[in-house]
Image (spheres, grey):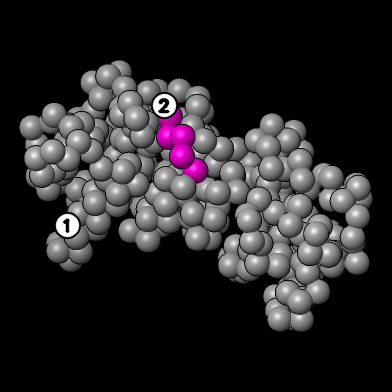
């Protein structure tokens, strides 16, 4: 059992709390039973798995499966588990895995989200979860958005991080234009647009543009959209959370697609 906070593996895992170290080590953290289950379900390669003795006793099958997929497995003390986890009350297991190879292409079919400078990891994780649930083809994020493999993003995605195709682009405008040229309609969300999101034909291959939580979508991106839409709000309500806005449009698109079948 690992009990020392000075152990080299413990120090290495603790460093993964920072974005800089995750990029440097090319690893990310998986925290909690559910994320580990999801990683194993899709055969995602693991590096290390660390768990408490109580967790190992409670999850013998998952422990055995995780051990078969990782390079190193360790039982650790509660003190070590608390140190390597980013959550206040870890549920008993923390793993590390190799970061995904950086994707440069996503399908130009179906529904795709394109996110500009999204900063809140909970929002990004929730949009990944919702996009997967609504059957989206993928999700783009601009390079200045929160890290795709931030621990909070993974937790908020409820494991759908492993199932939805995602990619980072350093030039979101160029990426949007490439998808337009491939036949996708680009829909921008703006508070003062004339059209509501209900009036769009979502049966076409569509890319939904969503902006930063505070500043919204940049004028540059909004200007190249084929459609600009708003979500109707009651008087006195300034805006919706970006993840809620994404969910409304994704499910309106799904409703239209189901209706035509």
Question: Reading the chain from its start, which is encountered first: label 1 or label 2?
Answer: 2
| Left or right: residue 197 compared with residue 92 | left
Q: Residue at x 63, y 41 (%)?
A: 101
Q: Residue at x 60, y 49 (%)?
A: 151
Closer to us: 151 or 24: 151
Q: Position of residue 158 (x, y in %)?
A: 50, 60
The disc at residue 172 is 2
- Would you identify the image quadrant in which residue 30 lies? bottom right
- Would you identify the image quadrant in which residue 231 lies? top left
Q: Are marks 1 and 2 in contact (CB under 8 Å)?
A: no
Closer to us: 175 or 113: 113
Instruction: Check the image and name the residue furthest to the top.
Output: 220
Closer to us: 55 or 44: 55
Placement of 223 over or under 109, stated as above or below: above
Q: Secondary structure at mark 2?
A: helix
Q: Residue at x 52, y 48 (%)?
A: 153
Q: Quadrant of the N terminus?
A: bottom right
Q: Position of residue 78 (x, y in %)?
A: 79, 64
Q: Position of residue 157 (x, y in %)?
A: 48, 55
Point out the stretch of residues depicted in magenta.
Answer: 117-121
Q: Quadrant of the C terminus?
A: bottom left
User: Taking the image as drawn, is residue 26 in sight?
Assistant: no
Q: Residue at x 36, y 34 (%)?
A: 213
Q: Residues within 10 Å of mark 2 (few under 14, many from 20)?
A: many
């Amino acid at each position: 059992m690992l009990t020392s906070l000075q152990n080299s593996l413990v120090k290495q895992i603790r460093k993964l709390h920072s974005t800089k170290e995750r990029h440097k080590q090319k690893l990310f953290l998986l925290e909690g039973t559910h994320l580990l289950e999801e990683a194993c379900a899709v055969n995602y390669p693991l590096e290390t798995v660390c768990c408490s003795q109580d967790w190992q006793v409670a999850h013998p099958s998952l422990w055995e499966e995780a051990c078969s997929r990782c390079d190193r497995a360790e039982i650790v003390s509660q003190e070590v588990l608390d140190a390597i986890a980013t959550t206040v009350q870890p549920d008993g297991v923390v793993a590390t895995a190799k970061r995904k190879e950086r994707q440069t292409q996503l399908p130009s079919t179906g529904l795709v989200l394109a996110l500009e400078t999204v900063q809140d990891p909970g929002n990004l994780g929730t949009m990944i979860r919702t996009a997967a649930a609504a059957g989206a083809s993928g999700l783009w994020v601009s390079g200045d958005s929160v890290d795709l493999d931030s621990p909070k993003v993974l937790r908020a995605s409820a494991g759908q991080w492993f199932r939805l195709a995602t990619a980072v682009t350093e030039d979101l405008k160029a990426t949007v234009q490439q998808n337009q040229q491939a036949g996708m309609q680009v829909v921008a969300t703006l508070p003062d647009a004339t059209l509501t999101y209900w009036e769009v034909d979502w049966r076409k291959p569509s890319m939904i543009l969503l902006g930063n939580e505070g500043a919204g979508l940049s004028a540059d991106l909004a200007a190249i959209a084929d459609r600009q839409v708003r979500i109707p709000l009651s008087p006195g309500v300034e805006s919706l959370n970006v993840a809620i806005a994404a969910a409304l449009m994704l499910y309106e698109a799904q409703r239209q697609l189901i209706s035509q079948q």
